[in-house]
Image (cartoon, rainbow, N blue to C red):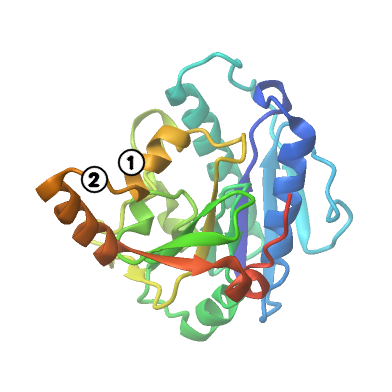
Amino acid sequence: MLVFVIPVKSKTIEKNWASFSRLLDRCIGSICNQSNTNFKVVVACHEIPETSYNNDPRVTFLQVDFAPPGINTELIAKEKDKGKKIKLATDYAKKLEASYIMIVDSDDCISNKICEFVNKNSDDSKSGWFVKKGYLYPEGKKYAYLNLKNFQTICGTCVIIKPEHIDLMYGDNFWFHHDRTKFPNVASLEPLPFPAVLYSMLNGSNICLDVGEMKKRTEVKPSKMVFFKTLFRRLGKYRLMPTALIKKEFNLKTI
């Protein structure tokens, strides 16, 4: 069985809890839209947000008892909070006898093909998979950017791994390295063969990817040779995709 783990930030550090809760509701909806129903969802949180899935038997809200980071704390404290929640939710997933877990950021959407693929391809010799290809979605737009090469370095929703290997993803101070794919003495994570995640950006709740960073990743600067080098690099890495073509697969709804 595949267990989806969603670490949720505290209400005390979220500027718009109502908007954040709607993003989480959409996220859980995309998970529950799986074509294969052999899955569970574990949401690790301080406060339980109001969603359409609060009484859904597939979804467990696991409340943590450690103090949340302060609203003005540095990124390392927020990442530590996230890492601790992932660890606690993974321990809970082990009790559910999960074969694999997938960590999902609370504002992202996932493909409805993931559970089917994992359950069909589960094997004791496989450590898991990583999301190499995925969509960067500027919230509210009618298009998304399909990243073809290194999605796992950009978005935290990119790891499917055996729960007993979860510690291999951690660095110091509970920092969860979502871009790790190779480990000593354990089989490497394999790339999923299809674009599997839609990364919601510019939604007001992103920790790392703001407007400036989005421009760096997608815009082409019109300056002679730099223009052409940047253009060819972007064309090799990104494709523009109308959201109407992927809306059903990712259960994408306007917030």
Q: In the displayed image of the protein, which residue is found farthest to the bottom?
A: 120
Q: Secondary structure at mark 2?
A: loop
Left or right of residue 241: residue 181: left
Residue 125 bears which disc, if any? none
Mark 2 and mark 1 in contact? Answer it, CB < 8 Å: no
Q: Please, is residue 210 above or below residue 217 in the view?
A: above
Marks 2/1: CA–CA distance:
13 Å
**x, y percent for residue 164:** 45, 58
Total labels: the figure holds 2
Residue 222 image label? 2
Q: From the viewer's perspective, is 255 left or right of 151? A: right
Q: Identity of the amino acid at label 1?
A: Lys
Which residue is disc 1 drawn over? 216
Residue in view at x 59 percent, y 75 percent: 245
Residue 193, located in which quarter of the rendered image? bottom left
* Residue under the image location 51 percent in, 77 percent down: 118
Q: Nearer the viewer, residue 130 or 95?
A: 130
State the residue at coordinates (58%, 39%). 85
Q: Amino acid at mark 2?
A: Pro
Q: Residues within 10 Å of mark 2 (few under 14, many from 20)?
A: few
Q: Position of residue 97 (x, y in %)?
A: 62, 66
Toward the viewer: 224 or 42? 224
Q: Residue at x 69, y 48 (%)?
A: 43
Tell me if mark 1 has few (under 14), some (14-19) or many (20+) residues whose alpha carbon lies within 10 angstroms of its own.
few
Q: Position of residue 173 (x, y in %)?
A: 40, 28
Q: Earlier in the sequence, mark 2 or mark 1?
A: 1
Q: Is residue 160 above or below residue 23?
A: below
Residue 247 seen in render: yes
**Is residue 178 rendered to the left or right of residue 250?**
left
What is the quadrant of the N terminus in the image?
bottom right
